[in-house]
Image: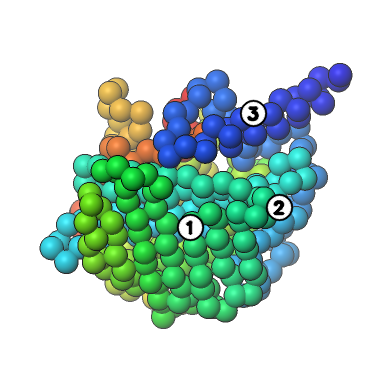
């Protein structure tokens, strides 16, 4: 067999193994298999549709699956408080990945307080009858996890959790509403990931979501309220071979302003992008000239524990100077490819909370 065919077969087998290993509630990452399927690999991504600047996002069609692309995700994080003031963070992500012409769906969910982090995983295919996707309005069911929405995506109902029956059982049931439009990142939804190479995705956000619902935590149902952030992204290649992973921040500066920053780390030159979104629908695009991000690390931790973030853009009067701190170091997702997804707090020129996602730190 030719080396190139052998390589493609190896990649496919690795991905299938990762999916099969991820059937349990908690799965330890296998270091020798921890290679990102989002990277460009010998032109393999060219078998799929490409994110292009001339493509225009249309709603509500953008909410539905784009199966001609290699991968995509629907992603929601929320900062919550119980009636008694206890802080919680939760994550729900639905992924679709094309593997050997088959469409696989898998979902990650997590619930955490300031000390404990619990996570769960679901996977399947529509052909296996454990995944059901409807397009307009968009809804997604994967086993017992369910997103149900209106034609405009929001309002929506979302429920997910752990299948365990012991003390670590947890559940999340949320109602999601917004009064703001969707925000197209980059150039009208065309989001670059590299300075020179044609690596990009289509990407839009909704950072102004009001949440209410209930969670099952340590054997008790608690009423919760808070704010959620929804991201939607699809493409066929997200990283160049020289890029290791990313640090992505969603920070609510106020009820009217939300700041998104991502840094794609590289052995050559990091790629940095940001946007300041306003609840009235306006968006200000930021680039590396506006953003300075410094990580703080500890040899005992796999991931940075804090960041210094400075954002300046004189033309719009923007001046942000923050220390962003991870609240719970346990917020690590270990389902095949390990990554950190968790709540942060920040102080400085602004005070508030949000989320950070960190990938590519564990080899």
Left or right position of 352 against 247: left
In the image, residue 230 sits, relative to residue 197, either above or below, namely below
Query: Circle 1 sits on which residue?
Result: 145
The answer to whether any part of residue 195 appears in the image is no
Q: Looking at the image, do the residues carrying marks 1 and 3 touch, with CB atoms under 8 Å apart?
A: no
Left or right position of 90 against 361: left
In the image, residue 66 sits, relative to residue 267, either above or below, namely below
Q: How is the image coloured?
A: rainbow
Which SS class for mark 3?
helix
The answer to whether any part of residue 88 appears in the image is yes
User: Rounded to the nearest whole Å, what is the CA distance between mark 3 and mark 2?
Assistant: 21 Å
Residue 109 screen position, x and y as percent: 42, 50
Residue 31 screen position, x and y as percent: 50, 22
Q: Outermost residue, front direction?
A: 165
Badge 2: how crowded within 10 Å, few (<14), some, or many (20+)? few
User: Rounded to the nearest whole Å, what is the CA distance between mark 2 and mark 1?
Assistant: 17 Å
Q: Earlier in the sequence, mark 3 or mark 2?
A: 3
Residue sitting at x 42%, y 57%: 160
Instruction: Mark 1 vs mark 3: give the one in front.
Output: 1
Which SS class for mark 2?
helix
Left or right position of 51 against 294: right
Q: Quadrant of residue 220?
A: bottom left
Residue 1 screen position, x and y as percent: 86, 19
Instruction: Mark 3 vs mark 2: give the one in front.
Output: 2
Q: Earlier in the sequence, mark 2 or mark 1?
A: 2
Q: Outermost residue, right direction?
A: 1
Query: Circle 2 sits on which residue?
Result: 127
Q: Looking at the image, do the residues carrying marks 3 and 2 touch, with CB atoms under 8 Å apart?
A: no
Query: Circle 3 sits on which residue?
Result: 14
Q: Earlier in the sequence, mark 1 or mark 3?
A: 3
Residue sitting at x 47%, y 48%: 108
């Amino acid at each position: 067999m030719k080396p190139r065919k052998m390589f493609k077969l190896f990649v496919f087998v690795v991905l299938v193994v990762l999916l099969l290993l991820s059937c349990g509630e908690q799965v330890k990452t296998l270091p020798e298999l921890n290679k990102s399927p989002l990277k460009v690999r010998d032109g393999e991504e060219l078998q799929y549709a490409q994110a292009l600047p001339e493509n225009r996002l249309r709603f509500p069609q953008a909410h539905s699956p784009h199966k001609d692309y290699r991968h995509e995700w629907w992603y929601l994080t929320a900062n919550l408080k119980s009636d008694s003031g206890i802080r919680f963070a939760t994550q729900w992500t639905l992924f679709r990945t094309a593997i050997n012409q088959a469409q696989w769906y898998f979902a990650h969910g997590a619930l955490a307080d300031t000390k404990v982090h619990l996570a769960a995983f679901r996977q399947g295919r529509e052909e296996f009858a454990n995944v059901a996707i409807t397009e307009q309005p968009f809804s997604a069911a994967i086993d017992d996890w369910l997103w149900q929405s209106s034609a405009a995506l929001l309002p929506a109902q979302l429920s997910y959790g752990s299948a365990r029956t012991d003390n670590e059982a947890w559940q999340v049931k949320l109602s999601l509403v917004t009064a703001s439009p969707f925000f197209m990142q980059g150039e009208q939804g065309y989001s670059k990931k590299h300075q020179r190479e044609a690596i990009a995705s289509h990407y839009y956000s909704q950072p102004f979501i009001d949440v209410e619902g209930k969670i099952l935590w340590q054997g008790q149902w608690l009423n919760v309220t808070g704010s959620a952030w929804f991201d939607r992204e699809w493409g066929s290649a997200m990283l160049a071979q020289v890029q290791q992973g990313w640090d992505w921040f969603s920070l609510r500066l106020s009820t009217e302003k939300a700041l998104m920053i991502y840094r794609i780390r590289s052995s050559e030159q990091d790629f940095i992008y940001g946007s300041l979104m306003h609840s009235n629908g306006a968006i200000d695009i930021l680039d590396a000239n506006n953003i300075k991000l410094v990580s703080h690390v500890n040899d005992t931790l796999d991931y940075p524990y804090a960041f210094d973030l400075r954002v300046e853009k004189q033309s719009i009067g923007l001046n942000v100077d923050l220390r962003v701190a991870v609240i719970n170091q346990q917020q690590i997702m270990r389902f095949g490819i390990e990554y950190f997804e968790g709540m942060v707090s920040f102080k400085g020129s602004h005070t508030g909370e949000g989320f950070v996602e960190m990938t590519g730190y564990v080899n």
